[in-house]
Image: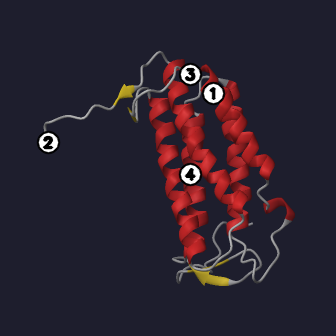
Amino acid sequence: MKIYTKTGDKGITSLVGGQRVSKCCERLESYGMTDQLNSFIGELICLCTYEKDAAFLTDVQAKLFVVGGYLATDTTQHEVRPGNIVTEEMVAEVEREIDRINDILPPLKLFILPGGCMASAKAHVCRTVCRTTERCILRLAETGVEIDDNVLAYINRLSDYFFVLARKMNVDNGVEDKIWRRTSKP
């Protein structure tokens, strides 16, 4: 199979089902950001010190392909393929992992700055890219495209997961969270 097809050289590409659209449309932006998030997660996995975290993140990567497949399908033209359906159970899995991690963290009393160890900093990057992905999906919905509630819930929970994972990675590496303090200096 050739990697290049030359069919997108003029800024047009295909959705699931073959419909041709501009590479600048909101639908492509939404699943393109999902792909970008997936790539940042790949970087984060390289910094994981615990196999359980790496395994969960690898599962998230696979599920982001499901999200991307859903977003790449114009449901007015084609049915969503069974493998591209985001389920309540997928959302619940993320919630359980957030709860598991949060139970081992010290209580959060103040705002924290992104950073600490490198792994935590990368988790915060994933968190912010996830929020950008969520906004892209919402902009797609604002164009009139119906988005399944589970897709939005999954992406929303995922950003919360990256926040607690960032804190855990600091704990794992013996680094304290950096507390945000208002300064009087500009």
Q: Earlier in the sequence, mark 1 or mark 4?
A: 4
User: Residue 186 got which mark?
Assistant: 2
Give the CA separation, mark 2 to mark 1.
36 Å
Q: Are marks 1 and 3 in contact (CB under 8 Å)?
A: yes
Q: What residue sits right under mark 4 in the picture?
A: 37
User: Residue 101 got which mark?
Assistant: 1
Location of residue 178 (image quadrant): top left
Kind of residue indicated by mark 4: Leu
* Residue depicted at 50% across the width and 51% down the height: 129
Give the CA separation, mark 4 to mark 2.
33 Å
- Identify the residue at the far right of this view: 82
Kind of residue indicated by mark 2: Pro
Say left or right for 166 vs 112. right
Instruction: Give the x, y percent position of residue 10.
Output: 53, 84
Q: What residue sits right under mark 3 in the picture?
A: 105
Q: Earlier in the sequence, mark 4 or mark 2?
A: 4
**Mark 4 or 2: the one toward you:** 2
Q: 10 Å neighbourhood of mark 3: few (<14), some, or many (≥20)?
A: few
**Mark 3 or 4: the one toward you:** 3
* Residue depicted at 54% across the width and 80% down the height: 9
Kind of residue indicated by mark 1: Ile
Dot 1 falls on a residue whose secondary structure is helix
Q: Nearer the viewer, residue 182 or 131?
A: 182
Instruction: Give the x, y percent position of residue 44.
Output: 55, 37
Q: Are marks 2 and 1 in contact (CB under 8 Å)?
A: no
Instruction: Give the x, y percent position of residue 73.
Output: 73, 73
